[in-house]
Image (spheres, helix red, strand yellow):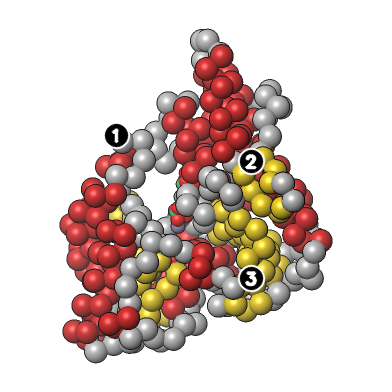
């Protein structure tokens, strides 16, 4: 079964054709990162306009790459939540149009669920599993009983982890998106140079809080002059160490409270090699799965892949929904 997937929830226009939920026949990603760099973050109105420009070239390139014609497709899938309203709308309208014109089933997919599925694509699926979402907009732990059955364990009470990487990067005058730049800079720094710590939430030991950590980094930077490259490296490394140690601590607590067979980690922050190494070595007694790097950031292959496991959505009921968690977890 060949599913054509569309992803446009934020600043990537992406299309993909995936067979039977796992075999990627074609995958196109047009990133808008360069456009938004001048603003230090995603400018929503520009993002939607850019999706309008790139959507049809993206559809065409993907069909060509897969040597597919439209009549060879079996269904259309699209990320309809969460994300920027205008951006989601572009993907949803394109998917509805293709579905209507080709008389194909339409499948609406939760983009965050797809980040978790990206860690399952091509890997063994073992349940119950602990799911960890680490993206620019979300940070949470879920218990996974099966694809589509999730129970929320904990979430961030303020910033998402990717967001805090982006904000600290901007304090260090690094370009958007900041995560990869912090990772690179951290490789040259001393992770123990500054005693940064992520927050704890009263009576909720598994919940996350990154806004205090971010403010602590800001106040530290304000006191330092000159901010040399060496100092920046130490700050990046200390911040990253604090964020990842906190994740490991809370994942450890979650693992103790359930009988999990595997860990699946998804979302853009899983691009970080230091994180992958730290999780794999800290939790060496349980299989820990990550998406392949081309599936870590926002992409349509994970959308088309997950759609294979989902029922069709009536075309008139599929509307963009900027909120995620309520549509995903019990
Ligand atoms: O999942 P994603 O592509 O988009 C959302 O759904 O939010 O995640 C984007 C986030 C950004 O905050 C970006 O800075 C972060 O992932 N990120 C990283 C790395 N690469 C991307 N964070 C840490 N280290 C990286 N190498
Ligand atoms: Zn995402």
Q: Quadrant of the C terminus?
A: bottom right
Query: Height in image: 158 above or below 102?
Result: above
Q: Kindly state the secondary structure of the residue where label 1 is placed.
A: loop
Q: In which quarter of the image is ligand 2?
A: bottom left
The verdict on label 3 being within 8 Å of ligand 2 is: no
Picture disc at residue 243 = 2
Picture disc at residue 151 = 3
Q: Give coordinates of residue 151: x percent, y percent.
A: 64, 70
Q: Kindly state the secondary structure of the residue where label 2 is placed.
A: helix
| Residue that sits furthest to the top in the current view | 225
Q: Give coordinates of residue 237: x percent, y percent.
A: 62, 31
Q: Residue at x 38, y 76 (%)?
A: 108
Q: In which quarter of the image is residue 68?
A: bottom left
Q: What's the distance in space between the residues labelled 1 and 3, CA to CA?
A: 39 Å
Q: Give coordinates of residue 47: x percent, y percent.
A: 27, 51
| Crowding near the residue tagged with mark 1, few <14, some 14–19, many ≥20 C-alpha atoms within 10 Å | few
Residue that mark 1 sits on:
38
Report whether 268 appears left or right of 98.
Answer: right
Query: Height in image: 283 above or below 272?
Result: below
Q: Give coordinates of residue 82: x percent, y percent.
A: 42, 62
């Amino acid at each position: 079964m060949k599913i054509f997937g569309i992803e446009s929830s934020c600043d990537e226009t992406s299309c993909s054709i995936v067979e039977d939920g796992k075999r990627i026949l074609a995958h196109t990603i047009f990133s808008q990162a360069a456009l938004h760099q001048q603003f230090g973050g995603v400018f929503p109105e520009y993002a939607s306009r850019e999706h309008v420009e790139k959507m049809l070239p993206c559809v065409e390139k993907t069909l060509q790459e897969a040597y597919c014609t439209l009549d060879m497709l079996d269904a259309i899938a699209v990320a309809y939540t969460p994300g920027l309203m205008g951006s989601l709308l572009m993907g949803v309208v394109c998917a509805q149009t293709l579905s209507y014109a080709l008389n194909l089933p339409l499948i609406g997919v939760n983009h965050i669920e797809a980040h978790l599925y990206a860690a399952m694509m091509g890997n063994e699926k073992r349940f119950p599993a602990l799911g960890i979402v680490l993206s620019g907009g979300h940070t949470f732990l879920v218990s996974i009983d099966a694809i589509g059955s999730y129970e929320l364990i904990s979430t961030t009470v303020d910033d998402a982890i990717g967001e805090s990487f982006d904000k600290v990067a901007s304090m260090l005058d690094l370009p958007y998106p900041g995560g990869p730049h912090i990772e690179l800079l951290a490789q040259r720094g001393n992770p123990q140079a500054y005693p940064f710590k992520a927050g704890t939430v009263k009576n909720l030991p598994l919940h996350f809080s990154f806004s205090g950590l971010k403010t602590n980094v800001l106040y530290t930077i304000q006191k330092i002059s000159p901010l040399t490259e060496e100092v920046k490296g130490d700050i990046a490394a200390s911040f990253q160490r604090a964020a990842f140690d906190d994740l490991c601590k809370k994942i450890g607590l979650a693992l103790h409270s359930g009988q999990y067979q595997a860990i699946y980690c998804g979302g853009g922050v899983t691009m970080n090699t230091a994180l992958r190494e730290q999780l794999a070595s800290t939790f060496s007694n349980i299989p820990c799965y990550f998406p392949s790097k081309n599936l870590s950031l926002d992409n349509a292959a994970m959308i088309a892949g997950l759609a294979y496991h989902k029922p069709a959505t009536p075309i008139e009921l599929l509307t963009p929904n900027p909120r995620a968690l309520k549509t995903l977890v019990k």
